[in-house]
Image (cartoon, rainbow, N blue to C red):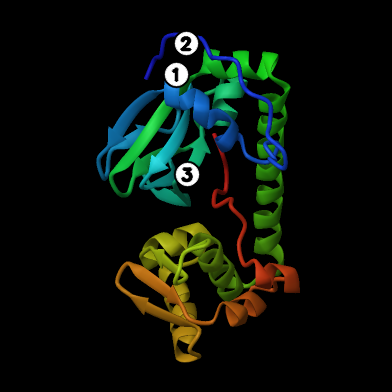
Amino acid sequence: MPLSKIDAPPRRPAGPGEDRSTSVTAILRATLATDGLPHVLRPGELLWSQGDRADALVLLNSGTLREYRSSPLGQRAVLSLLRAPEVLGEVAVLDGRPHLSSVEAVTTCAVVYLSREVLVDAILRDIEVCQAVFARLGAQVRQLTEQQTDFVFLDLPGRVAKTLLRLAGGTTPLSVQLNQTTLAQIVGGARQSVNEAVVQFVRRGWLHAEPGRFLILDAEALSRRAGLPPYARAHPVGAATRATRD
């Protein structure tokens, strides 16, 4: 979606105790509220397709998006589920290259577009925005490194446990709206093997599974199965849920 250049307003300094370096979402929210272009996506509607030109940063205000890559034969590999509030598209916007993956709406989603010109201008003239973007990109590199390590050191049940904890985030109760086919694509396993892991967790009383939804009953047990350290068990998942960002 081509966007015209929009003049970004001056940004206020960070308030006492406010950590803006870790959240580009918080820093850009004020600008997006006044200078962004709002849009509503219906379930199944594409935000963009793999290979599309990147011309905007996008803030997800409500709803859930699915990020996936497609093979030349049309096979899908789901990379992640994105829940509001979330910012996406920054890598492709910054390097000017096409999007590496497709993003579609799982539920009705309210998004706001911020043009590449406005984002680049904000980075060049506002050190806080620049630091926030670098911090976010650094977090994505760490996330990618962790996920690659998981494929080496964790077996499939361990990856299933860790993925469910990560996707549950801070929900109360801890739950994930997800079917087993999508879960299998995210963890990189066959659906039958993922089903066996889920059945094992259900039998042990760690998890309740129903069509399209998982309810975590024992986060501590799943954390141990995922090989998470004690601190991570107390804080089971990070904010990031994406395998890549483009």
Instruction: Please provide percent x and percent y for residue 208.
Output: 40, 81
Q: Badge 1 is on which residue?
A: 35
Residue 77 vs residue 45: left or right? right
Type of amino acid at the residue the image marks with label 1: Asp
Type of amino acid at the residue the image marks with label 3: Pro
Residue 81 vs residue 139: left or right? left
Is disc 2 surrounded by few (<14), some (14 to 19) or many (20+) residues within 10 Å? Answer: some
Between the C-alphas of marks 3 and 1, the distance is 18 Å
Where residue 85 is drawn, which disc sits there?
Answer: 3
Q: What residue is drawn where x is 72% and y is 38%?
A: 16
Given residues 84 and 93, the one toward you in this image is 84
Where residue 194 is drawn, which disc sits there?
Answer: none
Instruction: Please provide percent x and percent y for residue 93.
Output: 55, 23
Where residue 6 is drawn, which disc sits there?
Answer: 2
Helix, strand or loop status at disc 2: loop
**Image quarter of the N terminus:** top left
Q: What residue is drawn where x is 74% and y is 74%?
A: 230
For residue 14, above or below residue 238: above
**Image quarter of the C terminus:** top right
In the rendered structure, are the residues bearing label 1 and label 2 in contact, judged by CB atoms less than 8 Å apart? Answer: yes
Q: Residue furthest front?
A: 16
Type of amino acid at the residue the image marks with label 2: Ile
Between the C-alphas of marks 3 and 2, the distance is 22 Å
Instruction: Give whichever of discs 3 and 1 has the lower sequence position.
Output: 1
Q: What residue is drawn where x is 57% and y is 48%?
A: 243
Instruction: Give whichever of discs 3 and 2 has the lower sequence position.
Output: 2
Would residue 53 be seen by someone viewing this image from the given angle?
no
Helix, strand or loop status at disc 3: loop
Given residues 29 and 64, the one toward you in this image is 29
Is disc 1 surrounded by few (<14), some (14 to 19) or many (20+) residues within 10 Å? Answer: some
For residue 103, above or below residue 188: above
